[in-house]
Image (cartoon, rainbow, N blue to C red):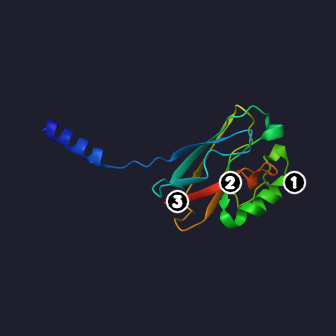
Amino acid sequence: MFKSLTAIAALFFSSMTFANCEFTIEGNDAMQFNKKSMEVPKSCETVKVTLKHTGKIPKKSMGHNWVLTTKGDMQAVASAGMGAGLDNNYLPAGDERIIAATDIIGGGEQATVEFSTKDMSTDGEYMFFCSFPGHSALMKGTFKLI
């Protein structure tokens, strides 16, 4: 009987698909992310994104963060963030348009953010970007729940 249960459990678990809900993205000293898009399975109730700064320049000169908003909110959040300053990660404090964001990091550093997808939809249009002043023009991409 034990062998039968083991075989059934092995068959069950081998047929299951586990979604990858953890992602790594890199930013460099040339103001580029190494990804232009990210696709996340809807089965991910929470998502973990780690940003790695592969450059050498410190955050006060070439800092990067990873910010997620709707496509429609991206430009307004990036513009509002410019006045918030480095101490606030170039993001307006308490802004409900921000779905998720890491801290600003410099060369050789990394930061991680974990967030819920509960209020996101598969037909929603989302963008990720860096809110360091001027970076969002180049450092941006699409984020899709599939």
Observer-nearest residue: 7 or 76?
A: 76
**Number of the label disc, if any, that sits on residue 140:** 2
Quadrant where the image shows the N terminus: top left
Q: Secondary structure at mark 1?
A: loop
Mark 2, Cα crowd under 10 Å, few <14 / some 14-19 / many 20+, is many
Q: Secondary structure at mark 3?
A: strand
Q: Which residue is mark 3?
A: 145
Q: Quadrant of residue 63?
A: top right
Q: Position of residue 52 (x, y in %)?
A: 65, 37
Q: Can the viewer see residue 67?
A: yes
Q: Earlier in the sequence, mark 1 or mark 2?
A: 1
Residue 4, above or below 38: above
Extreme residue toward the left, this view: 1
Q: Residue at x 43, y 49 (%)?
A: 19
**Number of the label disc, if any, that sits on residue 83:** 1
Observer-nearest residue: 21 or 143?
A: 143
**Side of 92 where 141 appears, left or right:** left
Residue 44, above or below 8: below
Q: Residue at x 71, y 50 (%)?
A: 139
Q: Position of residue 53 (x, y in %)?
A: 69, 37
